[in-house]
Image (tube, rainbow, N blue to C red):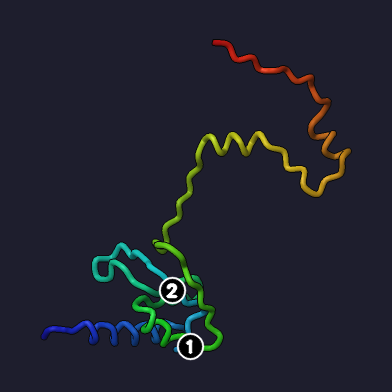
Amino acid sequence: MRRTRNDISCVAILLALAACQGGSAPETVFLGRFVMLDNSAPEVAALAVTGGRIVARGTAEEILELADEDTRLINVPGVAVPGWVDAHVHVAGLGEFLETLNVQAQDLESIRAKVGRPQRQRRAVHGS
């Protein structure tokens, strides 16, 4: 028996409805372009999320059918990879950050205490 895309979509919608807590609508629907890194659905246009977990994925039309008036809709620009956390730093940016002093919402005495006594500045001379 060969399944059509519509059959698979209907099964996905039914599974999503069952996965939503007690058959209720998802808390959030994300609309955009999502790369799923899954050969069965490498790219989708919408995700339904409840309790911080993806409960359904598919076309925007399929996922919006699951939503109700309490569902938060979020448009995601560009391309997103759900679950991907890019935790890295650029060393130059980190060094620059560590060399800065946040003086926002501080009085002059607090700033002076953090900075200390200013040193005489020297001019840099560029030679040939």
Mark number displayed over residue 24: 1
Q: Residue at x 17, y 84 (%)?
A: 3
Q: Residue at x 34, y 64 (%)?
A: 35
Query: Which callout, 2 or 1, points to the residue nearer the camera?
Result: 2
Residue identified by numbered label 2: 31
The Cα–Cα distance between marks 2 and 1, rounded to whole angstroms, is: 19 Å
26 or 23: nearer the eye? 26
Task: Say which of 17 and 97 sits in front.
Answer: 97
- Residue at 48% x, 72% y is 75
Q: Earlier in the sequence, mark 2 or mark 1?
A: 1
Q: Residues within 10 Å of mark 1 (few under 14, many from 20)?
A: some
State left or right for residue 45 relative to residue 122.
left
Q: Residue furthest right?
A: 109
Residue extending furthest left?
1
Going by the numbered disc 2, the residue's amino acid type is: Leu
Q: Categorize mark 2 by other alpha carbons within 10 Å: few (<14), some (14-19), many (20+).
A: many
Q: Secondary structure at mark 2?
A: strand
Residue 6 locus on image (x, y percent) = 24, 86
**What type is the residue that disc 1 sits on?**
Ser
Picture layout, residue 117 above or below residue 81: above
